[in-house]
Image (spheres, grey):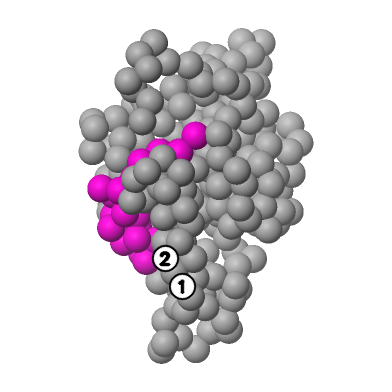
Amino acid sequence: MKLDILAIAAHPDDAELSCSGTIASHVAKGYKVGILDLTQGEMGTRGTPAIRLEESDAAATILGLSARENLAFEDVFFSEEKRYQVEIAKILRKYRPEIVLANAVTDRHPDHGKGGSLATKACFLSGLRRLETELDGVPQEAWRPQAVYHYIQNNYIEPDLVVDISDYWEIKKESILAFKSQFFDATSQEPESFISRPGFLDFIEARAREMGHKISVRYGEGYTVERVPGVDNLFHLL
Ligand SMILES: [Zn+2]
């Protein structure tokens, strides 16, 4: 199955926190969108890999994803070396997305910057026809996405472009809250983490409002680009 957009995320919930409004907006427009999680987030303070997989499935349903996969790389310890690039390239060749959304170029959690850079390298590698890969015993053809946009997660980064998600804010919020183990829950017996504090969702909303403000809409999601974006119709820009 071919996807139009693939979001690549170091941890299950990175995509929901950073680009789920964009995902919901494009699903609503008829595009096929998927998420590739690189790790199961097993080093996270709260929850377990099994719980986070269940939560990922629930969020996938809320967002209307066409596919969601998890490569089960080692949380915190995965690197940008060849074997990780090749595993991602196989997924890119399987789904052949035109656009890839990837982790922030730098962030509070080092996995995010590393995941963003790894995704960039894998997108290039996947386009090299001399890299031979197989899926279920069948040789795969080379595929390079047209564009990689890096979403902005925890640390503020000045965006190069902002997507209007005003009509999709509620879906974004719902998809984030699907990760029940990670966020504030007054009844939870688990230790508090950076993102489980009560004010964390207020911060997510504040960020979406700040990004939206830049393009005069209610809510937005910001991205940095790897190459200059082009249009053939200036009215397609807000
Ligand atoms: Zn993360």
Residue 148 position within the rendered picture, expressed as x and y whole percent measured from the top left: 54, 29
| Residue at x 31%, y 54% (from the top left corner) | 169
Mark linked to residue 179: 2
| Residue beneath the point at 51% across and 53% down | 14
* Residue drawn at the location 41% of the way across and 40% of the way down: 215
Question: Which percent across, then down, holds residue 21?
Answer: 36, 47
User: Which segment is the magenta one?
Assistant: 161-178
- Give the residue drawn at x 67%, y 36%: 118
Alpha carbon separation for disc pair 1 and 2: 7 Å
Indicate the secondary structure of the residue bearing disc 2: loop
What amino acid type is highlighted by mark number 2?
Phe
Residues at badges 1 and 2 in contact (C-beta under 8 Å)? yes
Q: Main secondary structure of the magenta part?
A: helix
Q: Which residue is mark 1?
A: 183
Between 125 and 5, the residue placed more toward the observer is 5
The picture places residue 41, in percent across and down from the top left corner, at 57, 60
List x then y, in percent, for residue 134: 55, 23
Which quarter shows the N terminus?
top left
Report whether residue 22 is seen.
no
Looking at the image, is 65 positioned above or below residue 200? above
Q: Is residue 161 visible?
A: yes
Task: Identify the element where label 1 is drawn.
Answer: loop
172 in magenta: yes
Q: Is residue 17 magenta?
A: no
